[in-house]
Image: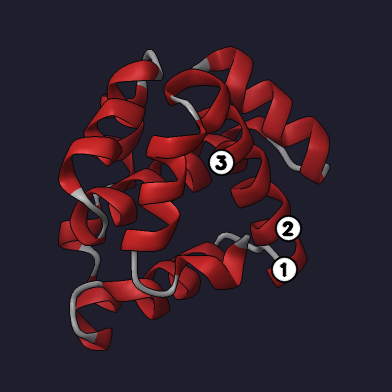
Amino acid sequence: MDELIERLADKAGLDRSVAGKTIGIILAFLRNEGPQQPVQALIDSIPGAEAAIEAADTSRSGLSRLIGGGGVMAMGTRLLGLGLSVSDIQTIARELFKAGRDRIGAEQMGAILEGTPGIRQFT
């Protein structure tokens, strides 16, 4: 996970802790909203991903509950709340999905992108 965080932080010009939180939030969103098997394959391919998802703690966020508990709007709101711009979010998402293609293959990553409502706006 550290290597991935470093890569994403460098690409987006972010602090490592913000990049790590961003990865956790995105992976938690994919787990809740995306196709189960390919998303789990992605999570399993990233050492430390489960801990990042837990640290994101999306289920207890008061803001997430106000917005309806989940979905792409809640994810975007949480990421903007970290101080990210839409451009930062797109950069991190693109790099995360590129790393995903390297880890689980283009077919499974494509299934995630096609099967997750709203995720395309970040790619």
Q: Give the quarter of the image for residue 82.
A: bottom right
Indicate the secondary structure of the residue bearing disc 1: loop
Q: Give the residue drawn at x 32%, y 61%.
A: 115
Question: From mark 3 to mark 1, how far is it between C-alphas?
Answer: 18 Å
| Nearer the observer, 41 or 71 | 41
- Name the residue that disc number 3 marks: 97
Image location of residue 8, percent across then percent down: 69, 34
Answer whether residue 81 is visible to the viewer in this image: no
The image quarter in which residue 42 lies: top left
User: Who's the residue at 18% across and 75% down the image?
Assistant: 69
- Mark 3 or mark 1, earlier in chain: 1
Mark 2: amino acid: Asp
User: Is disc 3 surrounded by few (<14), some (14 to 19) or many (20+) residues within 10 Å?
Assistant: some
Labels 2 and 3: the sequence-earlier one: 2
* Distance from the alpha carbon under mark 2 to that under mark 3: 14 Å
Instruction: Give, as a three-letter code, the residue at label 1.
Output: Ser
Farthest residue in the front direction? Answer: 107
Q: Quadrant of the C terminus?
A: bottom right
Q: Residue at x 26, y 56 (%)?
A: 34
Position of 55 with respect to 120 (left or right) is left
Is 41 placed above or below 116 here? above
Q: What residue is shown with label 1?
A: 85
Q: Helix, strand or loop at disc 2?
A: helix
Identified at 19% across, 84% down, the residue is 68
Residue identified by numbered label 2: 88
Q: Is residue 101 left or right of residue 40?
A: right
At label 3, which amino acid type do we have?
Phe
Could you tell me if the residues under marks 2 and 1 are in contact, i.e. CB atoms within 8 Å?
A: yes
Q: In x, y percent, where is residue 16?
A: 65, 31
